[in-house]
Amino acid sequence: MEVGQLKLVFKVMPFLVLGFLLSGCLPLNLLEQGPGGMFAVVLNQEGAYEPLLSGGALWLLAPDGKPQRKLLELAEEQSAGEISWAPSGGELSLTVVQVGEYGFPEEWRIVRVPLEGEPVDIVSHDYPLISPRYTQTGSAILYLAIPEEEPALYRFDFATGEEQLLADNVLAFLLSQDKVYLLDTNGAVRVLGEEDVLAEVRCPEEYCQGTILFWPRPFLALDPTGRYFAVSLQGEPGVVTPETDSVPSLYLVDLEGGEAWHLATPAGAPAFSPDGRKLAFAAGSVEKVRKAFLYDLETRDLEPLEGSEGVVLLSWGPSGLIAVVELADETYRFLRWTEEGWQELLAGGAGEGS
């Protein structure tokens, strides 16, 4: 398949919680591992995890997943997520949203949280501030903002304290080495500052664009070298009478080679390993049970990871693959996968006495 022919439609993976769409676009909360091996995640008042929540606190966890201490207390009317670690591992940033009447956001802040010291607001506005990410040097943060009708990419410089507009009409951005890759609102994938379109997708509906804008992680990933782009897309249903639902498929695009191929259906939540050799993703099996899979980019071998049944989100840290697994009682657990198998993180949650 030629890259230029990749014109399918984004849509939410059906196994993501429907409440995500009813939450007023709160930031997505994931367990993130920093360069030094420590973890950070927002937990509720009982010390338990939820992908979207209000209140609670930002916690620092040891490399073995045990809670260490709170880094930032949140008010009951505040929601936080989109954690990003600085390259030094000495601080992190996240989005904090003030939730107003009927659960909709009223104020957005990007907060800089040092492991030692007091949190500091970087920017705050009454319009969305989304997906803060440190630059490679750690001297600035990139983020999306929507001051008008269209989202745009901004850069905040720590030395000058100034905001700089980098690009208009940006639906999502991904970092790889010293380059910034953009997905614009017209569906074009390109490198910031360059004109060449590397791939093209179609996502014209407001519902579709809003989902990708606020929660890109379940749909998009870029390998550390910038060669491979993984995307979960909604295709046309195979049966039209009687009416059936289409299901999301995962595609892998070789941005250098100019080709793309299908990996799995239904599938999503792509995440590349730090060495760029493997792609992890969540997919339904023959028994319709969601589990994590590993795809080897060199050999093209596909390996199911048994013991990950119920996985909904995936991320990759320095010490292994992190899976968010939803249990039958609608609670969640964190699992870390290495060559030795799965290990549970944050077992028992973080109580007030931790």
Image (cartoon, rainbow, N blue to C red):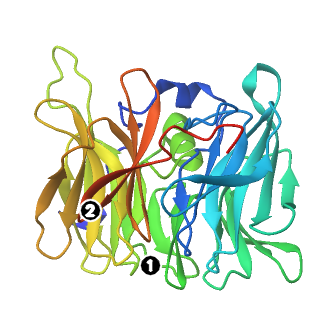
Q: Residues within 10 Å of mark 1 (few under 14, many from 20)?
A: few
Q: Which residue is mark 1?
A: 196
Left or right relative to 337: residue 44:
right
- Image mark for residue 252: 2
Residue situated in front as seen by the camera: 32 or 132: 32
- Looking at the image, the residue that sits furthest to the front is 353
| Quadrant the N terminus occupies | bottom left
Q: Amino acid at mark 2?
A: Leu
- Measured as percent of width and height from the top left, residue 333 is found at 43, 39
Tag 1: amino acid: Asp
Residue found farthest to the top = 242
Q: Which quadrant holds residue 2?
A: bottom left
Please name the residue shown 41% across and 77% down the image.
224
Q: CA distance from mark 2 to mark 1?
A: 19 Å
Where's the C terminus, which quadrant?
A: top right
Please report the residue visible at 57 percent of the width from the left and 49 percent of the height from the top.
Answer: 213
At label 2, counting other C-alpha atoms closer than 10 Å, the crowd grade (few under 14, some 14-19, many 20 or more) is: many
- What is the x, y in percent for residue 20? 54, 31
Q: Determine whether, in the image, residue 298 is placed left or right of residue 41.
A: left
- Point 29% across, 53% down: residue: 342
Q: Is residue 121 above or below residue 37?
A: above
* First reached walking from the N terminus: tag 2 or tag 1: 1
Question: Residue 210 at x, y = what percent?
Answer: 57, 41
